[in-house]
Amino acid sequence: MSCFSLSFYKMNGWLIIDKPSGITSTQVGSALKRLFNVRKVGHLGTLDPLASGLLVMAIGEATKLIPYVEKNISIFGDSCRPKKEYEFDILFGSATDTYDAHGIVTGVCEHLPTKKEIYDACAAMLGDQYQIPPVYSAIKLNGKRLCDLARKGQNITPSARKITVFSLEYIGQSCETICKSKFLATVSSGTYIRSLANDIANKANTLGYITYLRRIKDGSFDIDQAISLEKLSDLSHKGSIRSFVFPIGAFLGDIPVVTVSEDEWSRLAVGRSVNLPDNASSTAVQIFLKDVLVGMGYVLDGVCYPRRILSHDGGV
C-alpha cells in the first residue's frame, strides 16, 4: 500500500523533524500533510525561518495532545520550565531590526569585543531574568502578531517575559576575526535567542545579530532522534515512512493512566463524568479503553472528567 493512500485514522502520532533553514514551522506542517495525506498537523513550539534543527510535529489526533506533551508543561499550570539547547553565531559590529541576518541594518559599531568582554557578557546573562522579545516575533498583541504590526510601521514595545539562562558558553570564532563568534546556550522555554544575542552584544559594548541558529535539544527530545524532510520524502516513495512515526501516547511520560469500560467510555465520549473511586485525584490522566488510549481527562475526588477525546484507534 502506498503511503499516500493510508487512511487518516492510521496516521496519528509524532515525528521529530530536523527543520532546514529558510522555511517556517508552518511550511514543515504543510509538507507533512502532503506526505502523510492527513488534515491535521501541529508542532510543539516554533522555529524562526532562519533557524534549523529540532521541531517536534504532531500528526492527526496527536494534535489534541500537544498541551500535555509540550515541553513537559501541564496544561493546568506552568509548574516547570523545560530546557532547550541552541547553537548560534553572532556577527558583531552591527544590528538589524529583526536581530538576525534577515533584517534591515539599524546601526553600526566600530568596536569589536575582546574575548574577555564576550566571556564577561556571557557570565552576566546567566540565571533568571526578564527578556524583551524581538518586535519581529509571532507573539500576539490584541489578537495581532507583533511582526505583522511591525511590518505596517507601528511602533511597538513588547512586554518583558521571565526567562532563565541555565548555561551560556562562548565556543570560539566562526571566522578569522572575532567579528563572528559561536555560542552554545541552554535556556528555558519562551526564550528568544535573537534577543539573547542582542543582549550579549550590548553587554560586550557593541552591536550584534544572529547569523546562524540551530536547536539541538528541546526538553527530553534530541536532534539525534530527528529526520530531515528530504530523507522523509525519499522514504515515502519506498513505503517505509511510517517507521519514523512515534505512537500517539509515546511522549505522555508519567501522566497517570485510568482504564474504563465500554459503558464508562460511552459517557466520557459525550462529555459526561464517571465514578472511578479507586483512582486518586490528578490534574491530568490518560484514559484507556482496554489497551487503547482514547482520551485525556482529570480525576477529582474519585470522579473522572474528560478533556480531550481521541479516535478509538489511538495510534499510528
Image (cartoon, rainbow, N blue to C red):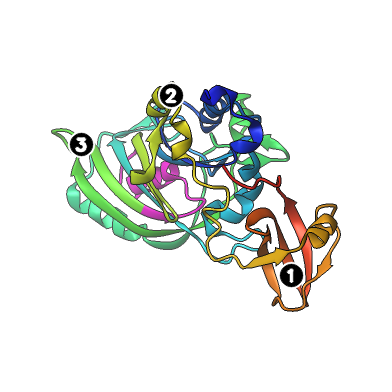
Q: Nearer the viewer, residue 12 or 53?
A: 12
Q: Secondary structure at mark 1?
A: strand
Which residue is rendered at x = 72% and y = 38% of the image? 143
3 and 2 marks in contact (CB < 8 Å):
no
The answer to whether 105 is drawn above or below residue 290 in the figure is: above
- Left or right for 100, reference 63: left
Q: Marks 3/2: CA distance?
A: 32 Å
* Mark 2 and mark 1: Cα distance apart in space: 42 Å
Q: Amino acid at mark 2?
A: Ser
Tag in front: 3 or 2:
2
**Label placed on residue 233:** 2
Instruction: Say whether marks 1 and 3 touch (CB < 8 Å).
Output: no
- Residue identifier under label 3: 174
- 43 magenta-colored: no
Q: Residues within 10 Å of mark 2 (few under 14, many from 20)?
A: some
Which sits earlier in the primary sequence, circle 1 or circle 3? 3
Residue 311 image position (x, y, % from top left)? 71, 45
The mark found on residue 149 in the picture is none
Residue 210 on image: x %, y %: 36, 36
Amino acid type, residue under disc 1 in the picture: Val
Q: Which residues are magenta?
A: 186-209
Sequence-first disc among 2 and 1: 2
Dot 2 lies on which element?
helix
Between discs 3 and 2, the one toward the N terminus: 3
Indicate which disc residue 299 carries.
Answer: 1
Q: Residue at x 68, y 67 (%)?
A: 258
**Above or below for 161 versus 36:** below
Q: Position of residue 229 (x, y in %)?
A: 42, 28
**Quarter of the view holding residue 141:** top right
Residue placed most toward the observer, 118 or 43? 43
Distance between mark 1 and mark 3 Cα atoms? 53 Å
